[in-house]
Image (cartoon, helix red, strand yellow):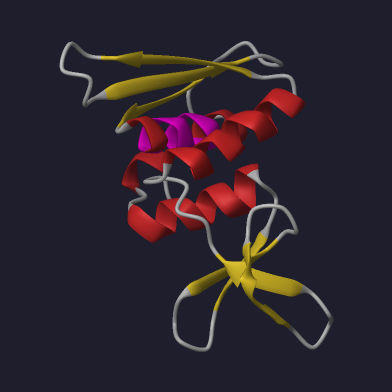
Amino acid sequence: MNRVSELTGRELDAAVAEKVMRCSVRKGPSGGLLCGCGHTCDYPHAEATRDGQLYGDLAYYSTDIAAAWQVVEKLAQDGFWLALHSDWSGRMFTAVFRGGKDFAGEGNGSAPEAICRAALTEMEGESG
C-alpha cells in the first residue's frame, strides 16, 4: 500500500474516492479513471457496467476545492471536523481532521490537496 505522502495527482484522487468516499474506481475505455459511487461522479458522462453499476468521471478531489469539500462533508457525516490553516502567503495549507480517534489526520499542500491528504491519513491511521 502507498503511503499518503507518496500519492500524487490522479493516484491521490483515486485513493480518496476509494478510502474516504467509499467508491469503486476503474479505468475507462479511453484510459481515464471512472468512479462508481452514486454521489460524486460526473453522471452526464456515465456508463454502466455489465453488473449495472453506474460509473462516471472521477472527481478531481486533490485540485478542485468543490470536490475536496465533498470530502469534508463526507467526513463530517462520519463525526469528523476540519481545521484548515494557511501560511502567510495563502498558497500552502495544512488540514487537520479530528474526531472519533485519538489522533488527527494531517496533510499539506494546496487547500484541496491538504484536505485529501488529511482525510486519507485519518482513514488509514497513519498519523498516530
State the predominant SS element of the stretch in magenta. helix
Q: Residue 31 at what x, y percent from top left?
A: 44, 82
Out of 96 and 102, give the one closest to the viewer.
Answer: 96
Residue sitting at x 63%, y 71% = 44
Q: Residue furthest front?
A: 44
Q: Is residue 95 located in the magenta-colored stretch of the structure?
A: no
Please give left or right for residue 41 compared with residue 52 in the image.
left
Task: Classify 4 as above or below 79.
Answer: below
Out of 91 and 128, give the one closest to the viewer.
Answer: 91
Q: Is residue 119 located in the magenta-colored stretch of the structure?
A: yes
Q: Residue 110 at what x, y percent from top left?
A: 30, 33
Residue sitting at x 54%, y 62% = 58
Q: Residue 27 at what x, y percent from top left?
A: 53, 78
Q: Which residues are magenta?
A: 113-120
Please give left or right for residue 51 compared with residue 125 in the image.
right
Q: Residue 10 at what x, y percent from top left?
A: 40, 59
Which quadrant holds residue 69?
top right
